[in-house]
């Protein structure tokens, strides 16, 4: 019998593909993703395996290990604080409890929540807050440019660092707009500048695209915090860009609710630097997580949370906290966690809507669960309105987004397309009970591939203010009437092809 190299190689390839497929199946990813990877490996046995090892879940597992260690270190330091605050507020409502379970951060009182609907007002408030810092300033940004807007903030950070304030800036490694001269100037002044998930030694495209920190966080003295959609860039500034400045939403929070932003920043800081900021010392921890601006001792808060009036002596004074006027909760998520906290919270919030569901997002490429939840709300008679940009900075996202419109329109949802300039806000208003402002878009990239953060406000004036801002934005938008199915064939073909890339968009 003649030996056949062709037959041998064919059998070897089949065995190889079966073995690799077994490993892929054991990853327990979604059926679609699993079948896609198996197809790639079968079509390109060697190249496919190399790509899988580089960009597949095993690469992410290595990232997850270090990130989970960072989260655990911060979590151990915060255990007493989290238990104390949860008891003080006594979690009320299913969404609040879900948020605490999903995001591992308790809701807290917000003494103030101020919305910013343009970059100039936000940057003015940010510079003012930094100028008043006494102990520390923490910043984490996806984009931080040293343009006209960024230079103002850089100057404020340098001034505080020279005055002895601890200043830390964590910027995503894709920060092409932050030049070496600006970094050197900050570091010379004492500002600790670090880069998140830096790519070394080669700038591989997949590492530049995935596993980025898309968060925008500023914490001043553990008591004033900022988050929302605005990066530090002239794109958001009418002073620099005029009428072309992007429309965005940011929020300043004052009070204990800022602790959630602080904890979120510190987790990524520990990951990027392996520095826990000395929080193992109680006095250092209390400076980063102050119960009050006066620096009330943490012991007072913990003893208050553990106080049981049924065991107190008769006639003993009882220190009972007044109910907070506004409760806010910070939810953070990233690819390091098997539970996608922000996506799960959005799903729970959407399905809880009874009267209105008003969503604003620049990038709308939802997964099946979120799409079904929004459609279901519309079918139930909820006033569902989506405010989306007429065009984004990504033609592929625009094309893919359009393929989801028909289903929502058929369910009774209203879709509005915001005319120029670019709409970049990520917000939600649900009934009169919940407002969400954050960094997460309604797409797979935000929910599963990047590190995001949102602030959820339970009741209070913030809900009404965000609803009024939404209605104002509708005046600059046109309602979509025509279905995608009636569009030209070539346009529908391109959109359908773009939708295949939805998990990466």
Image: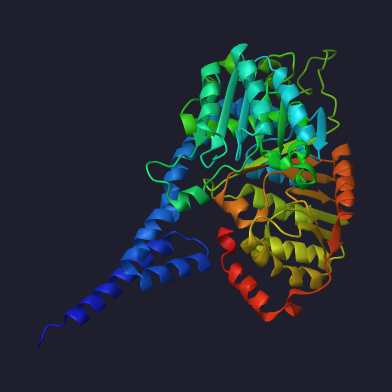
Q: Position of residue 410 (x, y in %)?
A: 80, 73
Q: Is residue 431 visible?
A: no
At a point 67% along the width and 80% down the height, the residue shown is 489
Q: Residue furthest bottom?
A: 1
The front one of 320 and 362 is: 362
At a point 82% along the width and 23% down the height, the residue shown is 321
Q: Is residue 348 visible?
A: yes
Q: Position of residue 328 (x, y in %)?
A: 76, 36
Q: Position of residue 403 (x, y in %)?
A: 69, 70
At a point 42% along the width and 61% down the height, the residue shown is 26
Side (left or right) of 48 relative to 402: left
The front one of 291 and 190 is: 190
- Up the image or down, 93 lies above or below 407; here it is above
Res 491 → quadrant:
bottom right
Res 228 → quadrant:
top right
Side (left or right) of 188 relative to 369: left
Quadrant the C terminus occupies: bottom right
The front one of 155 and 400 is: 155
Quadrant the N terminus occupies: bottom left
Q: Residue furthest left?
A: 1
């Amino acid at each position: 019998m003649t030996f056949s190299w062709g037959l041998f190689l064919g059998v070897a390839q089949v065995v190889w593909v079966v073995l690799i497929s077994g490993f892929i199946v054991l990853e327990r990813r979604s059926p679609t993703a699993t079948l896609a990877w198996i197809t790639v490996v079968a079509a390109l046995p060697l190249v496919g395996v190399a790509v899988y090892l580089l960009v597949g879940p095993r690469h992410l597992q290595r990232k997850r290990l270090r990130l989970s260690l960072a989260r655990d270190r911060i979590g151990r330091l915060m255990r007493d604080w989290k238990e104390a605050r949860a008891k003080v507020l006594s979690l009320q409502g299913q969404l609040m409890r879900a948020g605490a379970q999903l995001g591992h951060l308790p809701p807290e009182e917000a003494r103030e929540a101020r919305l910013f609907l343009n970059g100039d007002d936000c940057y003015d408030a940010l510079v003012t807050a930094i100028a008043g810092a006494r102990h520390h300033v923490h910043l984490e940004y996806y984009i931080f440019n040293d343009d006209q807007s960024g230079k103002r903030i850089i100057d404020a950070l340098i001034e505080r660092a020279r005055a002895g304030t601890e200043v830390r800036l964590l910027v995503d490694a894709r920060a092409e707009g932050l030049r070496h001269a600006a970094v050197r100037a900050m570091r010379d002044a004492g500002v600790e500048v670090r880069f998140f998930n830096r790519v070394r030694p080669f700038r591989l495209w997949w590492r530049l695209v995935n596993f980025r920190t898309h968060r925008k966080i500023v914490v001043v003295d553990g008591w004033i915090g900022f988050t929302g959609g605005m990066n530090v860039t002239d794109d958001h500034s009418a002073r620099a860009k005029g009428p072309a400045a992007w429309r965005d939403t940011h929020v300043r929070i004052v009070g204990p609710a800022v602790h959630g932003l602080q904890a979120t920043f510190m987790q990524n800081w520990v990951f990027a630097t392996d520095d826990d900021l000395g929080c193992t010392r109680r006095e250092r921890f209390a400076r980063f997580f102050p119960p009050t601006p006066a620096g009330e001792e943490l012991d007072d808060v913990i003893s208050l949370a553990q106080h049981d009036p049924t065991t107190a002596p008769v006639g003993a004074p009882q220190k009972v906290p007044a109910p907070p006027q506004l409760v806010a909760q910070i939810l953070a998520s990233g690819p390091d966690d098997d539970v996608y906290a922000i996506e799960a919270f959005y799903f729970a919030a959407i399905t809880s809507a009874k009267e209105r569901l008003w969503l604003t997002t620049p990038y709308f490429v939802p997964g099946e669960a979120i799409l079904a939840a929004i459609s279901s709300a519309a079918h139930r008679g909820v006033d569902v309105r989506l405010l989306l940009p007429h065009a984004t900075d990504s033609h592929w996202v625009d094309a893919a987004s359009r393929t989801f419109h028909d289903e929502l329109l058929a369910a009774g949802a209203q879709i509005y397309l915001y005319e120029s300039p670019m709409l970049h806000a990520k917000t939600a208003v649900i009934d009169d009970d919940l407002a969400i402002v954050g960094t997460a878009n309604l797409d797979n990239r935000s929910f599963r591939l990047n590190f995001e953060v949102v602030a959820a406000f339970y009741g209070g004036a913030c809900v009404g203010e965000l609803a009024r801002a939404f209605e104002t934005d509708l005046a600059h938008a046109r309602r979509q009437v025509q279905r995608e199915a009636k569009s030209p064939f070539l346009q529908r073909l391109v959109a359908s092809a773009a939708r295949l890339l939805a998990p990466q968009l």
